[in-house]
Structures are given as structure tokens and as C-alpha cells.
């Protein structure tokens, strides 16, 4: 009789706990899914940030590699040629799917290096709106735009 009572208690406990696993899963699953989506999204954003920064650095290097002033060209024309080379290289380094989302205008510009200095620097800035790439997910905050930037000082003999 005692054995029969123990078995009945175990069966009744199992019946009482039967729906608790489903309820616990319903509570925990959305939280875990949100965490996984957040990790993936932040990984993609970090990778995009790195791609933009490396492309801007390549563009800045292109301004340095562009040939120095050619005989018969003005200083302003040479500077503009270097700025154009920097912009073309920076956009050319990006994958086509990202390149099409970044406007060509304003990627590179010649700026003064420091106050009181006659040197010229080329600044390359790539800005990408993230809403064009990743859809918004509730409870996963994403930046509105990512930006990569690099600056190089041109030699004074240009």
C-alpha cells in the first residue's frame, strides 16, 4: 500500500508540472533570441565599421602615392588630383553593395593640417547609413550611421 501511494504522488506531481516547461520556454526563448540577434547585429556593425575605416585609410594612402606635381600644372590642380585619387581609391576599396550606398561627393577633401602651418592634409571620410543595410529589431539599438575616417599630410613639395 505504501508503494502504491508513492507512485500515485509521483504521477500527480508530474501532472502538476506538465505545463511548466512550456511556460518557462515561452519566457526564456524571446530573451535568448534577442540576445543572439543582438550579438549578430553588433558583429556586423563592427565589421562594417572596420571596412569603412580601412577603405578610408586606403584612400588616404592613394593621396600620398599620387605622383607629385607634373610640370605645367598648378599646385591647386595637383592637390585636387590627389583628393580625387583618394576619393576614387576609398570608394573602390569597398564592396559594390556598400559602395552604392555611399555618395561619391564629399568623400575626400583638402584641409589645412594645423593652425599656422602651410602644409595641406587630405581627409577621407566614408559615412554609411545603417538603416539601408540592417532592418531595425526591437530592443536591439543600432547606430543610425557608421563612419570611417583617415587623414594624411601631403609633402610640402606638391
Image: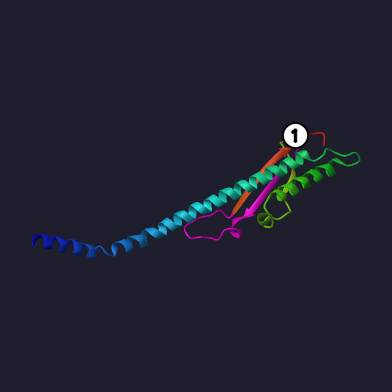
Q: Nearer the viewer, residue 137 or 19?
A: 19
Q: Viewed as shown, does residue 133 lie left or right of 113? A: left
Residue 108 coordinates in the image, percent (x, y): 73, 47
The residue depicted at 53 percent of the width and 50 percent of the height is 43
The N terminus sits in image quarter:
bottom left
Residue beneath disc 1: 117
The residue depicted at 70 percent of the width and 43 percent of the height is 58
Q: Viewed as shown, does residue 83 lie left or right of 43? A: right
The scheme the figure's colours follow is: rainbow
The residue depicted at 65 percent of the width and 44 percent of the height is 54
Give the residues drawn in magenta, as a range. Answer: 119-144
Label 1 CA crowd tier, 10 Å (few <14, some 14–19, many 20+) = few
The residue depicted at 36 percent of the width and 62 percent of the height is 26
Rendered image quadrant of residue 118: top right
Dot 1 falls on a residue whose secondary structure is: loop
Mark yes or no: residue 89 visible: yes
Q: Nearer the viewer, residue 29 or 107?
A: 29
Mark yes or no: residue 111 visible: no
Q: Is residue 130 magenta?
A: yes
Amino acid at each position: 500500500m505504501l508503494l502504491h501511494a508513492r507512485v500515485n504522488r509521483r504521477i500527480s506531481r508530474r501532472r502538476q508540472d506538465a505545463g511548466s516547461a512550456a511556460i518557462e520556454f515561452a519566457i526564456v526563448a524571446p530573451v535568448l533570441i534577442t540576445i543572439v540577434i543582438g550579438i549578430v547585429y553588433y558583429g556586423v556593425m563592427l565589421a562594417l565599421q572596420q571596412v569603412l575605416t580601412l577603405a578610408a585609410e586606403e584612400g588616404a594612402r592613394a593621396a600620398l602615392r599620387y605622383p607629385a606635381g607634373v610640370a605645367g600644372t598648378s599646385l591647386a590642380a595637383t592637390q585636387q588630383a590627389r583628393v580625387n585619387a583618394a576619393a576614387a581609391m576609398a570608394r573602390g576599396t569597398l564592396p559594390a553593395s556598400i559602395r552604392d550606398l555611399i555618395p561619391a561627393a564629399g568623400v575626400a577633401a583638402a584641409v589645412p593640417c594645423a593652425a599656422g602651418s602651410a602644409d595641406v592634409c587630405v581627409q577621407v571620410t566614408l559615412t554609411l547609413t545603417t538603416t539601408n543595410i540592417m532592418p531595425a529589431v526591437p530592443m536591439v539599438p543600432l547606430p543610425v550611421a557608421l563612419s570611417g575616417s583617415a587623414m594624411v599630410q601631403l609633402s610640402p613639395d606638391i
